[in-house]
Amino acid sequence: MQRLCVFCGSNGGHDPNYRAAAELVGQRLAERGIELVYGGGNIGLMGAVADACLAAGGTVIGVIPEALMGKEVAGRAVDHRALTRMEVVDSMHTRKARMAELSDGFIALPGGFGTFEEFCEILTWGQLGFHVKPMGLLNVNGFYDPLLHLFDHAVGEGFLRQQNRAMALADSDIDGLLTQMENYRAEPVSKWLKEEKQL
Ligand code: AMP
């Protein structure tokens, strides 16, 4: 893995552990010589992971939609000069496609709707066989336990295959998560479960 995409909150969360975990991710990526691809913002956990990666001598590529950049520049900072590279794209959709194209794997740190949507979309592309890259949740403070529970529930209720459920790696520790991601091999299975006829 030469480049990893990190999805994470544009807020920092209440518990300082969240910010500390994001900083450790940025630092570890830099130490391992893995480039960081992220949403380009300088706020919340997004700013924390990017700043820590840069501070540790890492490479950071931001991908930001024009509309969001305007807002951010007018409001709270995005320091374009600090990042190794900032790509400005035309929409949120282009941004996600570009982040996916640039990256060899995806990590979600705690966040809100934006983070959930980005991670679930990349999982969806994985289960459709559009890519075979590893995807992992950094489960800081058990933040993602309810989502992992929901994934298991979807398997139990016949909406998700166990093999596809297994694509969502999770670990509370960044080194553990990176090891799981390095060892990950996608199993190509059909997304669709066989319909059982109701009698
Ligand atoms: P959220 O989890 O709802 O805070 O959204 C975070 C995710 O959505 C990030 O991974 C970004 O890609 C995107 N995002 C949300 N807000 C911003 C922002 N102000 N600047 C840049 N990206 C953002």
Image: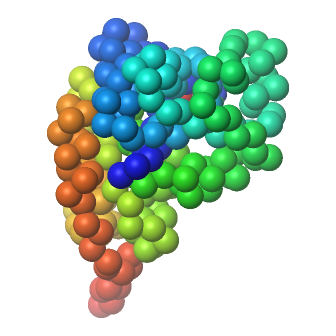
Q: Position of residue 4 (x, y in %)?
A: 43, 45
Vertical comparison of 136 with 47: above or below: below
In this picture, residue 195 sits left or right of residue 181? right
In this picture, residue 25 sits left or right of residue 65? left
Q: Quadrant of the C terminus?
A: bottom left
Number of dots carrying numbers:
0
Q: Position of residue 153 (x, y in %)?
A: 26, 54
Please give the name of the residue rendered at 36% of the width and 81% of the height, measured from the top-left corner: 190
Vertical comparison of 153 with 173: above or below: below
Image coloring type: rainbow
Q: Who is closer to the viewer here, 42 or 36?
A: 36
Please give the name of the residue rendered at 44% of the width and 47% of the height, measured from the top-left corner: 3
Q: Report the image quarter containing ligand 1.
A: top right
In this picture, residue 168 sits left or right of residue 58? left
Q: Position of residue 23 (x, y in %)?
A: 37, 19
Please give the name of the residue rendered at 20% of the width and 46% of the height, measured from the top-left corner: 179
Vertical comparison of 179 with 153: above or below: above
Where residue 67 sits, quadrant-wise, is top right
Q: Position of residue 145 (x, y in %)?
A: 25, 37
Q: Who is closer to the viewer here, 165 or 196?
A: 165
Vertical comparison of 94 with 75: above or below: below
| One can see residue 71 in this view | yes
Please give the name of the residue rendered at 31% of the width and 37% of the height, measured from the top-left corner: 32
| One can see residue 112 in this view | no
Where residue 38 sits, quadrant-wise, is top right
